[in-house]
Amino acid sequence: MAKIRIGVFGAYRGMTMIHQILGSSDAELVAVCDKFQPALDHCKEVADGEGMTNVAYYTDFEDFFLHEMDAVVLANYAHQHAPYAIRLLDSGRHVMSECLTCATMKEAVELIEAVERSGKIYSYAENYCYSPVRWEMRERFRRGDIGELMYAEGEYIHDCASIWPEITYGERDHWRNQLYSTFYCTHSIAPILYMTGLRPVKVSGFETQNRPFMWNLGLPAGCAGMIIVTLNNGAVLKSLHGYLKHTSHSNYQLNGDRGAMKDLADGRIAVYTEGENENCRGKHETYEPAPIVAESANSGHGGGDFYTTYYFIRAILGDKEALERMIDVYTAVDMCIPGILAYKSICNDNNSVKVPNLRNKEERDAYRNDTFCTFPDAAGDQYVPNNIHGVEPIPDSVYDEVRRKWIAGEPG
Ligand SMILES: NC(=O)c1ccc[n+]([C@@H]2O[C@H](COP(=O)([O-])OP(=O)(O)OC[C@H]3O[C@@H](n4cnc5c(N)ncnc54)[C@H](O)[C@@H]3O)[C@@H](O)[C@H]2O)c1
């Protein structure tokens, strides 16, 4: 059987997928696109080193788009995935999208309809769902070990100050400088939805203030965003993410009516379970679960990076397990739109906002023209600023200094 021909758009984070495709017996890397020539040069060096000398390299998306390929990995800017995904799906390509799925509610509707129209695979590369501990939490939750979910926490605290020059290049309009506090909610919310199969129905958003350690690097937004999410079984999820000083990078926990589970963030899971009439006298366990696929052990983000590309390729091949384990467009949208709607809440004194179930066609019309966001290109006339605290405008000299640090290879 011919190998699946895959193109990758964005060769920075995209290198994670490129490495894996180069090692795949079912897929081949045929094209890479990045407007930043040094990124392409690096990629070519890696691919040539693996004996893949026939890969085509493009700096322009339109040229890349015309290349013969069956599937495309989107690892371009986080707020620009949906328009590219829609074009690629409509041209008959399967798509795997890096985080996030969409920048606006309008794009969420359009993306879902493009997947439905095309019949192609759309898979969301939410790697935080797949570490061995989070997979174990999913398995045990679905087995009923802790009963009905009552409360959950998902935290992704990543103080990016030291790497800000490396990931924003001193560009004022880089998406990481244009985003708002609750935008990048995926790594905190997604694992909980993936474990439980529940969906969000209502959100209230909160954010911290901006502080000099990030303002001095060019970020005007509130540093961290908290979203209180009501799930469709009535449980409450606290999602927290952003740039905070911290003692632990992440926290995922589930509290059910018959037990609880927690990712101890060191490769171990803690589980508490109760039998019938055993209130507060249940069993405690702590252990290190094995990865579901041994090959994943050395991949990034606790092994999670491996599974997104692995299941994408296997899903295209029609593997039922992969189709069940990959993240489809409806769940992907559920993992991201709470962030958009939580910022509406923040802009409206933290009042709660309903989260639509966009699987239902009749719920889509209300959002077809909703471009509310802080990214000017996607927002048009519904643009809102990304800080609500009246933060001082950031002068060009700040971005010039970050750019200087990036070029010099200095930390932020
Ligand atoms: N899941 C994770 O753990 C994880 C980690 C890092 C990044 N990401 C995601 O990966 C994506 C890329 O992030 P990044 O860290 O690589 O930084 P980035 O967004 O700055 O880089 C994107 C790359 O795409 C290229 N690009 C963007 N638009 C282009 C265009 N129109 N034409 C040609 N090239 C274009 C840029 O030159 C750049 O090299 C984002 O969506 C981000 O959220 C995910």
Image (tube, rainbow, N blue to C red):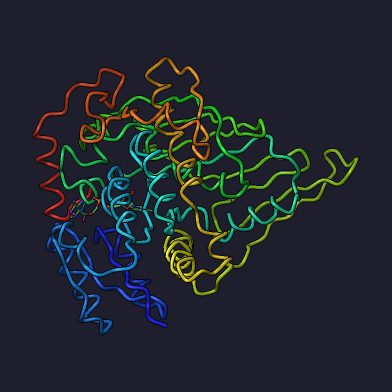
Q: Would you identify the image quadrant in which residue 112 lies?
A: top left
165, above or below 42, in the image: above
Q: Residue furthest top?
A: 349
Say which of 243 and 339 sits in front.
Answer: 339
Q: From the viewer's perspective, is residue 388 above or below residue 164?
A: above
Where residue 389 sits in the image (x, y, percent)? Answer: 30, 19
Apparent side of residue 136 relative to residue 203 in the rendered image (left or right): right
Q: Residue furthest front?
A: 117
Q: Residue furthest right?
A: 277
Front position in the image: 387 or 120: 120
Residue drawn where x is 56% and y is 49% of the image: 194
Q: Position of residue 101 (x, y in %)?
A: 38, 45
Tally of marks: 0
Q: Quadrant of residue 41?
A: bottom left
Residue at the image point whose x is 55% and y is 56% from the top: 266
Q: Position of residue 135 (x, y in %)?
A: 59, 57
**On-image quarter of the C terminus:** top left
**Quadrant holding the N terminus:** bottom left
Front in this rendered view, residue 243 or 39: 39
Q: Residue at x 19, y 63 (%)?
A: 64
Give the x, y percent position of residue 119: 44, 56
Q: Nearer the viewer, residue 209 or 78?
A: 78
Q: Quadrant of residue 277?
A: top right
> Is 72 above or below relative to 182?
below
